[in-house]
Image (cartoon, coloured by chain):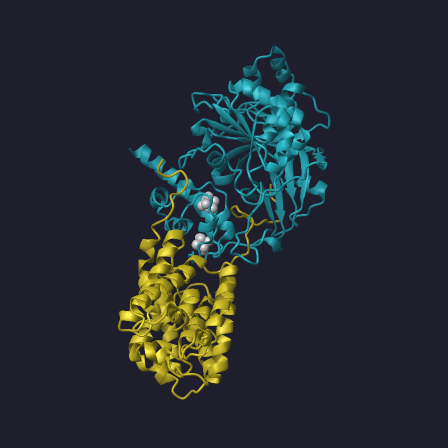
Amino acid sequence: MIKRPFFGLIQARLKYPALIPDQPVAIKDIDLSSKIVLLYENKTGQQNVSRLKAGDKVKTGQRLELFENTSDYIISTATGEVKEISKHTGYFGRNYISITIARNPEDQWDENFKTAGQAGNYEDVIKFLGALPGEAGLSTLLSLNPAEHPPINKIVIKGIDNDLLVANNQTILRTQLDDLKNGIDILSEIMHTTDIIFVVPPALKTQLSELGVTVKTVKPKYPNHFPHMIMKNVLREIVPAGKSPGDSKTGFINAEAVAALGMAFRDREIPIYKILTVIKKDSSVVMVRARVGTPVKDILDTLGIELNHGDRLVLGGPMTGHAVYSEDLPVMYDTDAIMVQGKKQIILSTDTQCINCGECIRACPAKVPVNMLVRVLENGLYDDAADEYGLFSCIECGLCAYVCSARIPVLHFIMLGKHEYALLKNAEESNA
Amino acid sequence: MHSQKLFIGSHAPYFHNGNSVASKSYNIMFAALPAVGMGIYQYGIPALAVITFSISCAMLWELIMNIAMKRPISIGDGDAAAIGLILAMLLPATTPWWIVLTGTFLAIVIGKQIFGGLGCNPFNPVLVAFAILMLSWKNYLDFDAALLNYDLGFKMLYPLGALKHFGINAIGDFTSQGLLMGQQIGGIGASCGLGLIIGGLYLILRGYIRWEIVFSFLIGIFVTALLYNISDPDKYAAPMFHLLTGYTLIGAFFLATEDSSSPVNLVPMLLYGAGAGIFTVLIRNIGAFVDGVVLAVLIFNVANPLLDKIRPKALGKGI
Ligand code: SF4
Ligand code: SF4
């Protein structure tokens, strides 16, 4: 945990990790699970899985459609037999279908992707790549369905992860330059654009000279590598409050996903391995490569990390991850990190009121008047929060909660506020 | 998916830099020690008695209010104790116990708790209490009268009182150096300039108070006093005199910077500090009161919500 410096006048600068150039990167491969769990986000909210049932045999790389009337699918990342299909509720009530597969040790690859690849038609190939390691919603991101999303004409590849301590993209930069190069070419072809910018911390700039794309450097100060901040500081474009960079026709993609794209075309196999940063209780870090769908428990066991009653398990990094209640949850396409915290390291939030100390104001990169915002949010004044106090300017970096003297779960309030506001607006619309 | 082990669930972020209300309060109290120590050294046991009694009473009132209002017990956060300490620092060493008792009641109950407690007070609780005491029992708080029986080996006149009542010639004996070293009578913890500066700089460096307020307040006082002094040096004291006497320094470091009643955005902080500084000198030079710090800061406490509306546009707003 990064503490306030003794001389607190100098703000704690939270820095992204920097892999030391020229030092080999150690990645531990973990791929022995006898069970694979796939989570399918059930956006349409249908109740009964009609096209898959327990007992079905699946192959690695097989495209599984669960419901009629939707083009959504999920790729099986293992060969074996479907054991269980159940429901799972995630962050902010998101609906998931969880598919447990008893895995055969030998992978048998489904041939459809290969066949599509040999035909050489991008569109057929992309049908299998809705999600890539490092990017859960690739097709959305690249707005491959122009009816739903405005077309992207500029792509920013992120060479550094959003969150602290997480070094997946940097690892890719260090170990998979060829795949990256391939991936960039393919990306440019699929998207019909050559306007591709690679954003890295200064220390990694030289590595990218051979990639043939525009490289921009951004200081590794948190949260400079959030898309909104890159838009502002690098592209000199301010994303309007509440909008995403995609609305400004700019797509952000992790280097990991680009490399995966490159690999997919090279090997004619759907990439199923995810790089993750495992953050141990003492904040030390191990880089791991695991199959998407691997239960978190298997990874922790392999690394000899023990979790006890009262500890905290987080999927994602220390500033933006999600705390989860079960070790059985799987690694997903966008699970960038697994963090465990011991009971003693956890600083709990309190229900103290805001003391107006102003720490959050100094910390907030989006100039949100956080001290006022928490007051209106606490009182449920979501309209005021959005109109006057910058609720939707917040980029969700969590710095305000990190520094809060009163230890208010500020970001939690903000996320809840955004959620409630959306519900309110929806209700108003349907009433109108 | 059920196991016996239960994990802590909470929302991001999962790091915290360790800031807390308690560390803030205790650091403020720690920073007050040099000035308080000097006060105890000068005035002896009575000063110590006022301080300890004030802290105890403040905590007691807080506890009573916690229980009465069915709120969690909050004396552990040190805020009440800090309020008690700072109030005592303003008082003369001879203050009778019942004034201390009333003063802490006013600070904790009227100044803080009835507005909703920590963080909800629109005025600095210490100043609310002190202003009421000042208006109610003027004689007990008049330093010249209260400290009549002391002889500390320097001029036993309250410098600002002397200036107000006897004019500029009466303050000729006060040197900046002497004032800085605490050779003046005044509040228990308010007269040793050096001690206050050391404590204040400590708080600034550690980031517990907002330096913008401190400096703009001091600059406000200095510049205003300087202008007066230039306009009529025979009538108005020099700026250094204003900086080192009365409640100027304790006001700059411990009173104007109270979190809840002061602004947090840059421009408002500067306006607030400078405004309070200017008003302080105005009250001292042309007002009815001997010292202006208490009222000036209170006035700007009132202005704070308005001032703090001047803030930068949040990211992505208005485009
Ligand atoms: S999470 Fe907090 S600090 Fe970060 S942008 Fe939002 S309001 Fe500002
Ligand atoms: S950091 Fe917390 S206590 Fe301080 S002003 Fe911000 S919200 Fe209030």
Ligand 2 shown in quarter? bottom left
Residue at position x 52%, y 64% in the image? B202
Q: Which quadrant is home to the C terminus of chain A?
A: top left
* Residue at the outermost top position: A119
Q: Position of residue A250 (x, y in %)?
A: 47, 28
Q: Position of residue B51 (x, y in %)?
A: 46, 77
Image chain in cyan? A
Vertical position of residue A89 compared to residue B210: above or below: above
Residue A151 or A76: which is nearer the viewer? Answer: A151
Vertical position of residue B44 compared to residue A196: above or below: below
Please identify which colour was used for chain B in the image.
yellow
Residue at position x 33%, y 60% in the image? B275
Residue at position x 53%, y 21% in the image? A194
Please tell me in which quadrant of the rendered image residue A83 appears.
top right
Q: Position of residue B223 (x, y in %)?
A: 36, 62
* Residue at the outermost bottom position: B149
Residue A33 or B270: which is nearer the viewer? Answer: B270
Residue A239 or A394: which is nearer the viewer? Answer: A239
